[in-house]
């Protein structure tokens, strides 16, 4: 129970801090060239998202172990990138996960769908629709409601990154960094568990 409380408090503090930084440093929806501060903000957002995902996964793991749920290895098997010894197949899968999927998903959700809804509904409804559809697209990789919430939160962060400068570059870079960490974990897990 204490892990749940700590997780909720930490995530709340993290998102309040990120919102404060976001509103103080940047004017939303201003189209401008990328600067060093933008790259630093993307990197800090990436760290914040990873920390949040760690907290969510920690909560999920503690609940799963009490209810004889999935273990860590089962989670990574279900994510989609095969743990294979064929380096050629792994390289193509990693390329897809780090480059192609973020490009496709960001153009589809933040670029096309978000701009299609712009002017028709307010920003909160637009963010909700885009984020829910993003999480639904990832349903084959989702095993419980906490993972669904993690995808939803990640999509909201990507939405805010896009809206900050109306540049897909920020969202694609953050998405690629996040998926790149998964590839690194897929390389390390076979060494540790098999």
Image (cartoon, helix red, strand yellow):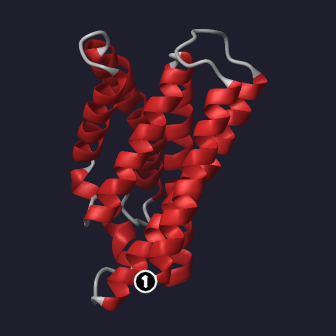
Point out the image quarter for the N terminus. bottom left
Identify the residue at image location x=43%, y=31%. Answer: 159
Circle 1 residues within 10 Å: few <14, some 14–19, many ≥20: few
Residue 57 occupies quadrant? bottom left
In this view, which residue lies farthest toward the right? 36
Residue 186 visible: no
Residue 75 occupies quadrant? bottom left
Identify the residue at image location x=25%, y=66%. Answer: 144
In the rendered image, residue 110, in percent from the top left (x then y), is placed at 38, 25
| Helix, strand or loop under label 1 | loop
Identify the residue at image location x=28%, y=28%. Answer: 125
Can you say whether 144 is above or below 90 in the image?
below
Can you say whether 194 is above or below 171 in the image?
below
Task: Answer left or right for 90 relative to 70.
Answer: right
Task: Answer left or right for 139 relative to 13.
Answer: left
Residue 173 visible: yes
For the residue pair 130 and 180, the one nearer the viewer reads as 130
In the rendered image, residue 183, in percent from the top left (x then y), is placed at 51, 55
In the rendered image, residue 6, in percent from the top left (x then y), is placed at 54, 72
Identify the residue at image location x=53%, y=30%. Answer: 161
Can you say whether 151 is above or below 124 in the image?
below
What residue did someone put label 1 on? 1
């Amino acid at each position: 129970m204490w892990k749940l409380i700590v997780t909720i408090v930490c995530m709340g503090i993290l998102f309040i801090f990120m919102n404060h930084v976001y509103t103080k440093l940047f004017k939303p929806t201003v189209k401008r060239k990328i600067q060093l501060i933008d790259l630093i903000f993307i990197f800090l957002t990436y760290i914040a998202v990873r920390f949040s995902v760690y907290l969510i996964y920690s909560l999920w793991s503690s609940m799963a172990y009490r209810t004889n749920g999935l273990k860590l290895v089962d989670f990574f098997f279900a994510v989609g990138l095969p743990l294979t010894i064929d380096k050629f197949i792994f390289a193509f899968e990693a390329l897809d996960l780090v480059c192609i999927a973020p490009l496709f998903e960001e153009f589809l959700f933040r670029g096309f769908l978000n701009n299609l809804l712009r002017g028709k509904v307010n920003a909160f409804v637009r963010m909700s629709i885009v984020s829910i559809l993003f999480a639904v697209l990832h349903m084959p990789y989702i095993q419980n409601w906490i993972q669904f919430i993690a995808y939803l939160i990640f999509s909201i962060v990507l939405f805010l990154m896009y809206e900050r400068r109306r540049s897909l570059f920020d969202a694609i870079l953050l998405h690629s960094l996040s998926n790149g960490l998964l590839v690194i974990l897929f390389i390390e897990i076979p060494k540790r568990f098999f």
